[in-house]
Amino acid sequence: TKILMTLPGKFNPLITAWDSVPVKDQTRANLIERLIKEEQRLTVMDATEEALATSDFGKRKTKVNSNKKFQNSSSGNIKSKKEVECYF
C-alpha cells in the first residue's frame, strides 16, 4: 500500500481497481506490471490529446448568419438568403 499512496492522482482508477484484486494476487510484481501498463496507456492518451489540440489550434471558427441580407447585382433588390431561389 505504500507504493499506491505515493502515486499521482492520474493513477486513482488503477488504485481503485487494485482493491478488487484478490489478496493472494496483490503481489509487488503484479502491481508493478499493472503500473507499467497504466503508464503506457496514459502516455498514449496524452500524446493523442496533444495531437488533437495542436491540429485544431489554427482553425478559425466563424458563425454563419442565415438571415444575412445581400443585394442582387442584376436587379438591385435586397433579399435574405431564405428568399433567394436556386437555379442549379
Image (cartoon, rainbow, N blue to C red):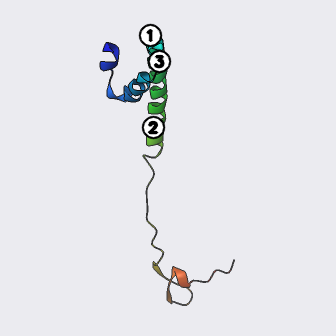
Which residue is at a point 37% across and 28% down the rendered structure image? 12
Frontmost of labels 3 and 1 is 3
Give the mark nearer the N terminus: 3 vs 2.
3
Kindly indicate the quadrant of the structure image that contains residue 8.
top left
Say if mark 3 contacts mark 1, CB within 8 Å: no
In front here: 59 or 3? 3
Q: Which residue is mark 1?
A: 27
Quarter of the image for the C terminus: give it.
bottom right
Residue 58 percent across, percent down from the top left = 44, 48
Q: Nearer the viewer, mark 1 or mark 2?
A: 1
Q: Which residue is mark 2?
A: 49
**C-alpha distance separating marks 1 and 2:** 33 Å
Tell me: residue 23, above or below residue 20.
above
Q: Give the mark nearest the N terminus, 3 or 1.
A: 3
The kind of secondary structure element at disc 3 is: loop
Sequence-wise, which precedes: disc 1 or disc 2? Answer: 1
Q: Secondary structure at mark 1?
A: loop
Locate the N terminus and report the quarter of the image it occupies.
top left
Dot 2 alpha-carbon crowd within 10 angstroms: few under 14, some 14 to 19, many 20 or more: few
Front of the two marks 3 and 2: 3
Which residue has dot 3 on it?
22
Residue 82 at what x, y percent from top left? Answer: 53, 81
- Residue 25 at x, y = what percent? 48, 13
User: Looking at this view, is 25 or 69 the one in front?
Assistant: 25
- What kind of residue is marked 3? Pro
